[in-house]
Image (cartoon, helix red, strand yellow):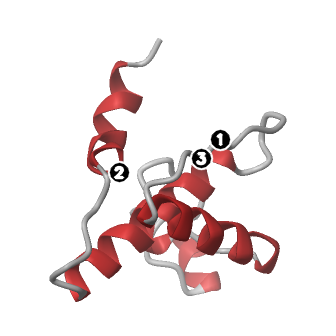
């Protein structure tokens, strides 16, 4: 395993579920979606994200959460929705 990580210059396994939100890769096809979701939530609009298994719904929401937290820490007037802070907890108790 160590040779795989060394060969590709990685510090951790790339497919671990415990990757930090900041370490997730944002494909170009999801960039606009993430920005639109962030703007909608900042405007206190509702958001529904659905799709087939494996298309990236969870990763997209994690990236939205990361963007919301990053902009909230950079702006004293920005607020992070309560769901963004509770996502990890909700995921661990969902059936």
36 or 4: nearer the viewer: 36
Label 1–label 3 contact, CB within 8 A: yes
Percent of width and height locating residue 4: 62, 71
Disc 2 versus disc 3: distance between alpha carbons?
13 Å
Pointer 3 residue: 47
Q: Nearer the viewer, mark 2 or mark 3?
A: 3
68 or 8: nearer the viewer: 68
Q: Does residue 27 appear to the left or right of 2 in the view shown?
A: right
Which quadrant of the figure contains the N terminus?
Answer: bottom right
Percent of width and height locating residue 90: 35, 29
Rendered image: mark on residue 61: none
Q: Residues within 10 Å of mark 2 (few under 14, many from 20)?
A: some
Q: Earlier in the sequence, mark 2 or mark 3?
A: 3
Does dot 1 land on a helix, a strand or a loop? Answer: loop
Disc 2 versus disc 1: distance between alpha carbons?
14 Å
- Find residue 40 and report its image quarter: bottom right
- Residue at 65% from the left image edge and 74% from the top image edge: 26
Q: Does residue 61 appear to the left or right of 91 in the view shown?
A: right
Q: Nearer the viewer, mark 2 or mark 1?
A: 1
Q: Residue furthest top?
A: 95
Q: Earlier in the sequence, mark 2 or mark 1?
A: 1
Query: How many marks are shown on the rendered structure?
Result: 3
Q: Residues within 10 Å of mark 1 (few under 14, many from 20)?
A: few
- Residue at 68% from the left image edge and 43% from the top image edge: 49
Rendered image: mark on residue 48: 1
Rendered image: mark on residue 84: 2
Q: Residue furthest left?
A: 76
Does dot 2 land on a helix, a strand or a loop? Answer: helix
Disc 1 versus disc 3: distance between alpha carbons?
4 Å
Label 2–label 3 contact, CB within 8 A: no
Residue 89 visible within the image: yes
């Amino acid at each position: 395993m160590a040779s795989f990580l060394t060969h590709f210059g990685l510090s951790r396994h790339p497919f671990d579920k415990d990757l930090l939100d900041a370490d997730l890769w944002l494909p170009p096809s999801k960039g606009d979606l993430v920005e639109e979701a962030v703007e909608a939530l900042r405007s206190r609009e509702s958001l529904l994200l659905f799709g087939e298994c494996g298309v990236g719904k969870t990763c997209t929401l994690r990236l939205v959460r990361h963007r919301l937290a990053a902009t909230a820490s950079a702006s004293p007037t920005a607020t992070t929705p309560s769901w963004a802070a509770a996502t990890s907890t909700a995921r661990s108790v969902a059936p």
